Amino acid sequence: MEQTLRLVIDCPDQVGLVASVSQFLAQHNATIVEASHHTDLQTGRFFMRHEISTDSLTMDIEQIRLGFAPIAEKYSMNWKLVDSSKKPRMALLASHESHCLMDLLHRWHSKELNCEIPCIMANHPQMKQFADWHSIPFHWIDFKTLGKEAAFAQISQLIKQYDIDLTVLARFMQILPDTLCKELAGRAINIHHSFLPSFAGAKPYQQAYDRGVKLIGATCHYVTSDLDEGPIIEQEVMRISHSDSAQDMVRKGKNCEKTALANGVRYHLEDRVIIHHSKTVVFA
Amino acid sequence: MEQTLRLVIDCPDQVGLVASVSQFLAQHNATIVEASHHTDLQTGRFFMRHEISTDSLTMDIEQIRLGFAPIAEKYSMNWKLVDSSKKPRMALLASHESHCLMDLLHRWHSKELNCEIPCIMANHPQMKQFADWHSIPFHWIDFKTLGKEAAFAQISQLIKQYDIDLTVLARFMQILPDTLCKELAGRAINIHHSFLPSFAGAKPYQQAYDRGVKLIGATCHYVTSDLDEGPIIEQEVMRISHSDSAQDMVRKGKNCEKTALANGVRYHLEDRVIIHHSKTVVFA
Amino acid sequence: MEQTLRLVIDCPDQVGLVASVSQFLAQHNATIVEASHHTDLQTGRFFMRHEISTDSLTMDIEQIRLGFAPIAEKYSMNWKLVDSSKKPRMALLASHESHCLMDLLHRWHSKELNCEIPCIMANHPQMKQFADWHSIPFHWIDFKTLGKEAAFAQISQLIKQYDIDLTVLARFMQILPDTLCKELAGRAINIHHSFLPSFAGAKPYQQAYDRGVKLIGATCHYVTSDLDEGPIIEQEVMRISHSDSAQDMVRKGKNCEKTALANGVRYHLEDRVIIHHSKTVVFA
Amino acid sequence: MEQTLRLVIDCPDQVGLVASVSQFLAQHNATIVEASHHTDLQTGRFFMRHEISTDSLTMDIEQIRLGFAPIAEKYSMNWKLVDSSKKPRMALLASHESHCLMDLLHRWHSKELNCEIPCIMANHPQMKQFADWHSIPFHWIDFKTLGKEAAFAQISQLIKQYDIDLTVLARFMQILPDTLCKELAGRAINIHHSFLPSFAGAKPYQQAYDRGVKLIGATCHYVTSDLDEGPIIEQEVMRISHSDSAQDMVRKGKNCEKTALANGVRYHLEDRVIIHHSKTVVFA
């Protein structure tokens, strides 16, 4: 993958904003590989993402950062300038279901996901075998012995120790405590096995079976203190019928889960997601 | 369309059931055009639909009905034997949005829907122009002048007067009173403009916009006293993104609504739907 | 619909391009409602579409056009500046199948398609009833009596007479002669009832049935002299199975055709499509 | 998974056929878990699949086989009676792309695919690591050193040696010789990375990119001597746009490939597919 810089901005919409940013980029001879804009007409908020080739640039990233700061200040921007060659550090949290874990690991292995995976944590020890194959440190968080509080303290501590940028709950069946949700705000992604807001909470496939819906789905979202209420990044659905048992739905649903989670994680890792209140802008 | 008989059955599952039915059909030289079975393993209920060509039959429908009655009794069947050449009578209820009404009318006009449409009712008079083009009697139900109670009494009376088999709420924005829901149980179909159970109730597109979902949908279901809780027949979804305004979602959603409603109505008219408690078996 | 201006550009990619355009827009106090960019990295071609609110503009469209001309020249742009309040004039060509015609007419009637429809032409006279309902002049092009050459000459003459901007072949089953294809280059849209390039030519549903595919589709594309080879604007697919007869596939396919054509036509009318060699950029 | 028997039949359609089969099943007290019928009205061919619980049966499988033989003969049936507890033996053939291999292995590991995998063969040695993790014998078929003829002879010999029932080409990029295709007729499944019949042959994603289609796909089909012309079992598609590079299409397409192949293989392993000339009946 070619090295690029990603300039991601959100701020109040104003005339002249795009001109200022694009003029700044032109002044430093930036070749724009990809550009995405969005204006939320209801709230008057503006969102922008540029992906810039580093080949033609006349300055390094730190100089650009310094140079851009006054523009950012003038327009009251939330912004970041990210070097694509600096891989984010992603931790995976799993439980006893391995399909999402395996899927993410293989996409990482085949370089579809551009990140490092410094550790895998799970509340079931048999997930170690997957970590071992990829030579990734594995931590069994023994919820039964430790109790919830100590277990989550250990997770929190490991996230800090490994200097994790993104924590992914790959069908991790434990509810994160409020403090950890806040600690990881905007930096933790979950996959819920229903088409939210339908069937929030436990046993979504059984709920879907009982309600007799004709499509099932999965939802990839940021973790927040309000369970299953975080900003949605990606959703997938699949058609079912009366002939699908609750177990068939589990099997079919796994495909939705893997796809929605893999896309959601990739969007985040490539700085394509901007959280805006309880929603997301995703420059897919 | 070729004339067929449709034998639709549901009963407790038992060994010998299919043999009895198929032997009966063979004895009368029935050529089976389409056969569908389903056993609900959780409840032990059996569902079956046969579509039989009338060409080869050695008896007429009434004789077959008489002949089948003892088998039906033996196995405690809910059953019906329907002559496809006898078109069901469908009434359409509309409001100020015309897309579902138009879509159903054109599918009927082009013979995709095999029924008669003896009347159209609406609480907005401008729907008359659509009825007129198709030479279908139109009744403006003036809710404002009449008040809800009298208006629904008129609708109920017209349904009886026209001897209606199926009442379709084609984006009819009024909530049917409990008595009418019960009167029309299993004979009234609604289209809800969300992917139920998400966003039940009013303004589902605005709800979807506010929640930031990445797919919107529509649900075709039988009308019951519990609003938006009736057995689901068909659902459709469509991908959206942050760049879709609430109005864009309305526009996109209309395609879902038209398709889900048209399929649901067709399934019902072709006797492909069996209601089982709060769910449906649809032999699509 | 609010009045906007649409600035649509394609040109060789260069550093400074976006800055020049956005600076120009800012100088005239343009509020950008929607902005889309694309760089084709293989050919080095740049594509851009801006939708600008007219409310805040300090100049009228003609002055802006004059002011922008030097920038367009500097960067060797293909460009247009379109006033959304000036509705394009769309002609519909139909045959004996009415579903696409009806669908477009109803979307136009409900203001989903922002255009005028000055005339409908068909080689079957019964399409007149649809035109009449909407009070649109109808021309029966009697191919049998006239012969192909005279018939197409009449169509060409009517397109000129009505000053048509876009000609839509709404399941018009005649192959346009080479000269007419060239005359209408980039201004004529067709719907083909297969997922091109599969099943080009005649009877695509029968071809699909014979090949045993598990999905069928429809393709909306610009008309070119090479039959079914024009730049694709939009495609739709739908799942089928062995239990679908060739007639079932026709029925199911119609939904694909209507949706793909309606979207393709809307994209064109809203200046969202840029043709680039044999392909399209669609800022949907 | 519960043990079942699967009775799969195809024969000329005749009155009395279903009665004979279902009566036979009832006589032996068979509980029908799942039943699927299909009559091809064009060719008059009848297809049927029953899945029967073994719990209630009064005879063992061999006695049932003997008992059914006269009925099968009377109606000129192709038929098989399969014991679900006897796992089919599946060989995997891979090349340098591992996504389909990994996906099948993990579905097998998590018991979604009910089979044995006695060996994996590949023309690239690095696939060994995946085989090792699952403790499956691995054979590197060194095409470069051996030459095509000897290499395929070795594959053919290994298929015999391991007593393989189903050979799956999991993105195996070599074209099987005619003799091997015939040897494995109906017992070898391939995944082609396009929506066939579009883009048959080499580099389908590049072909799709060049043609500018708006959807890409994958096709799971039986291997025949006519390359990419075998009976189709399953297809998947995914939406793309101008902003997807040829590499993006490869990434997106992999999801289609994995899903289509996994479903096609599962249908085959569960005896849900009946080949009929160049097409399939799939009781999904």
Image (cartoon, coloured by chain):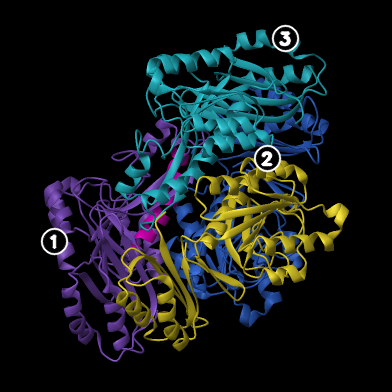
Chain colours: A cyan, B purple, C blue, D yellow
Distance between mark 3 and mark 1 Cα atoms: 76 Å
Q: Range of the magenta residues? A: B247-265
Question: Which kind of residue does numbered mark 2 sit on?
Answer: Ser
Q: In the image, is B280 to the left or to the right of B68?
A: right
Q: In this view, does A164 lie above or below C80?
A: above
Crowding at mark 3 (Cα within 10 Å: few <14, some 14-19, many 20+): some
Secondary structure beneath label 2: loop
Q: Mark 3 lies on which chain?
A: A
Residue A125 inside the magenta-drawn segment: no
What predominant SS class does the magenta segment belong to? helix
- Quarter of the view holding residue A59: top right
Question: Which kind of residue does numbered mark 1 sit on?
Answer: Gln
Residue, x 27% and y 66% (percent of image)? B90
Q: In this view, does C24 lie above or below C236?
A: above
- Residue that carries the numbered disc 2 in the rendered image: D243
- Residue that carries the numbered disc 3 in the rendered image: A67
Q: In which quarter of the image is the N terminus of chain B?
A: bottom left
Query: In front: A166, or C260?
Result: A166
Query: In front: B25, or B226?
Result: B25
Q: Residue B248 carries which label?
A: none
Q: Where is residue D120 in the image (x, y as percent from the top left)?
A: 68, 52
Q: Which chain carries label 1?
A: B
**Residue C58 appears anywhere in the view:** no
Query: In front: D107, or B280?
Result: D107
Q: Which chain carries label 2?
A: D
Q: In the image, is B12 to the left or to the right of D86?
A: left
Secondary structure beneath label 1: helix
Question: Which kind of residue does numbered mark 3 sit on?
Answer: Gly
Q: Position of residue D160 (x, y in %)?
A: 68, 64
Q: Residue B157 carries which label?
A: 1
Residue B250 inside the magenta-drawn segment: yes
